[in-house]
Amino acid sequence: MEDDFIPVRLSVNGVPHRLFVEPRRTLLDMLREDLELTGTNAGCEHGSCGACTVLLDGQSVRACLLLAVQANGHEVMTVEGLARHGRMHPLQEAFWEKQALQCGFCTPGMLMTAYELLQQNPDPGEEEIRSALSGNLCRCTGYQHIVEAIRLAAQRLREEAEAATPSETTA
Amino acid sequence: MKPARFRYFAPHTITEATQLLDEQGDEARLLAGGQSLLPLLNLRLARPSALIDLNEIQALAFIHPRDGGLVLGALTRDATLERDPLVAARQPLLVEAAHYVGHPAIRHRSTLGGSLAHADPAAELPAVMLALDAAFTLQSSTGSRTIAAAAFFKGPFQTALQHGEVLTEIHLPGLPPRSGSAFLEFARREGDYALAGVAAVISLAEDGTIAQARLALCSVGPAPLRAAAAETVLQGRHPDEAAWQAAAEAVVSELKEPPSDIHGSADYRRHLAGVLTRRALALAAQRAERSHS
């Protein structure tokens, strides 16, 4: 009985999956090992570093602190789900342009945390960005370029949203 | 890195959960938000034979008004506490303290009941429960009992919970009129465990003096501490700097042996406890006065 595998149905980046996992499998290991989505990184694996941050039903969570079986029936979004129509997400582009990464290990977690922040707050100030990133450790960059990249992406996303909404004056 | 093998159960009712606890024996553990237990499993510091996952029990996730106060289900998540308008209206102390628990990605999962049952001496919410005179419902397959927060916390990671019992409800009595509260803590980095934290509740009398002060601290001893001597010092006094100073001195003298580690010495924690006490009391009193105007 202890070797029993449990069926899990979930959606990852909009793709439905059905698989069998051991209860002790973390969501992180299921994403990386079973679904071969290795964009989500395994850092400290005890909830301190934020490298494995993914969204569960739209809310950021540590994939290392969730059992895969607990994702049954839920929607997961990973860094692989950010790109749109084969084009990098504005956050990813801004990270690239602003050199917001060196080794890149923390980047997937940073991106997912920033993605959630911009969903909730399209125009965050520097303090708000730094506060949102406080649960994600980067040991290379000193965070400055990451903060700048998020501000740039926020600006572009706001411009995109404005361009998509026909303004009343021109109507 | 992965946890040792365990049997896994995800009951849908409290009755099923207590039955499973009985069946699975002493080595079974309850899983709530998992933000403290999963690290222990991943590091194999805990090797339970069975995990009973409470997350599917809808009856444990609720926030209800009762007699001017609140009843909260043990599975209420910290992110929910932060945003709930009823909690903000009736027990803003809980909203303020919940915000200090880890980071958003933690708070989306971590639960009130989980934090209380885990009883980390550095955790914020157990201290808040002492300051709010909370009571907890503990349910087992043979019945349920209610226990005051003051009798619940026994030591580091030790509570009055017996095997077979599930913490199901948290009861918070309402505050008297002209009350204000504040939670303050000091941590090295945002989201870290505090070096010291203070929860303060001040209720003012008609004449503007302090009718009742309630004060509890975290991270300065083996369990959350109710600073009874400081509360007595404040009773009947005018809410002013001198009163806060006297209370802070009483708090510091009440601290037996705060932890001493690389993050801060015992002396530094004593100092922080005094400073935070003064500030939290002043802020709570200010809010009490504002609630009246």
Image (cartoon, coloured by chain):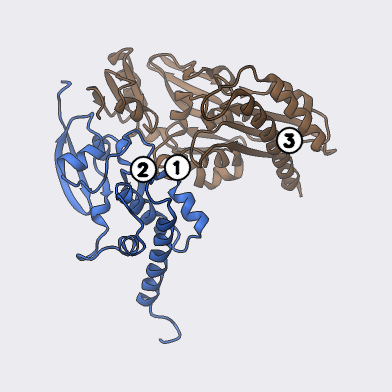
Q: Position of residue B75 (x, y in %)?
A: 42, 33
Task: Point out the tag, 3 or 1, that comes first from the N-terminus.
Answer: 1
Give the residue number, with chain letter if any, for mark 1: B103
Chain of the residue on which disc 3 is drawn? B
Residue beneath disc 3: B203
Residue at 26%, 63% in the rendered image:
A88
Residue type of the residue flagged with mark 2: Gly
* Chain painted blue: A
Query: Which residue in the rendered view is the most extreme toward the bottom?
Result: A170
Report the chain holding disc 2.
A
Is A170 located above or below residue A45 in the figure?
Answer: below
Residue A141 seen from this side: yes
Judge if badges 3 and 1 mark residues of a common chain. yes
Please state the horizontal and vertical placement of residue B248, each as a whole percent of the image.
73, 29
* In this rendering, position of residue B109 left or right of residue B215: left
Mark 2 near mark 1, Cβ–Cβ under 8 Å? Answer: yes
- Mark 2 falls on what kind of element? loop
Q: What label does residue B85 carry, if any? A: none
Vertical comparison of B35 with A9: above or below:
above
Please state which of residues A20 and B173 is positioned toward the viewer in this rendering.
A20
For the point 78% across and 25% down, the residue is: B233
Taking the spot 26% from the left edge, 50% from the top edge, the residue there is: A78
**Residue identified by numbered label 2:** A50
Does label 1 lie on the same chain as label 2?
Answer: no
Which is nearer the eye, B119 or B3? B3
Q: Which chain is brown?
A: B
Q: Nearer the viewer, mark 3 or mark 2?
A: 2
Query: Distance between the Cα atoms at labels 3 and 1?
Result: 31 Å
Residue B146 x, y percent position in the rendering: 52, 20
Tell me which corner region of the image, top left, top right, bottom left or bottom right, holds residue B22: top left
Q: Nearer the viewer, residue A75 or B168?
A: A75
